[in-house]
Image (cartoon, rainbow, N blue to C red):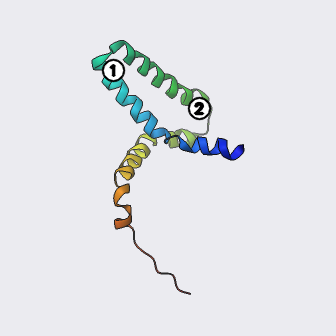
Amino acid sequence: MNQLIFGIVLLRPPLFIFLLLSVLCLVVNLFFAPVLSLFWALSLFVFVLGFLLPLRGADARIVKALKHIPSFMFYQVLSLMHARNANKRSIATRHFE
């Protein structure tokens, strides 16, 4: 049963993809359903607030690391775009016996 639950958890996309898609939905809903865009904006605000509230009194290194999340997401998207050519770009290593 534990393996089944673990497999289901692995089926979901990474969190940065969910965040980017929710921002995209927010922008699209600004044009088509402005009331629904308020729902998206409120949901994103609550998500960010869920990270900020526990940080009161946290170690400064943790806060500093969280400031780098946007650059991390940028590099994740960049890597995702280059994933198709990964085999061409990687360097094959030789193993000797």
Q: Do the residues labelled 2 and 1 touch (CB within 8 Å)?
A: no
* Marks 2 and 1, how far apart at CA: 31 Å
Q: Viewer-proximal residue, 49 or 59?
A: 49
Q: Viewer-proximal residue, 20 or 64?
A: 20
- Residue named by callout 1: 29
Residue 91 on image: x %, y %: 40, 72
Relative to residue 79, is residue 57 drawn left or right?
right
Residue drawn at x 41%, y 48% as measured from the top left: 76
Residue 60 on image: x %, y %: 57, 40
Say what amino acid the circle numbered 1 marks: Asn
**Residue 67 visible, this orientation:** no
Q: Viewer-proximal residue, 5 or 57?
A: 5
Disc 2 crowd rating (10 Å Cα; few below 14, some 14-19, many 20+) is some
Relative to residue 24, is residue 47 drawn left or right?
right
Q: Is 40 situated above or below 71?
A: above
- Residue named by callout 2: 55
Pick the quarter of the image with the N terminus: top right
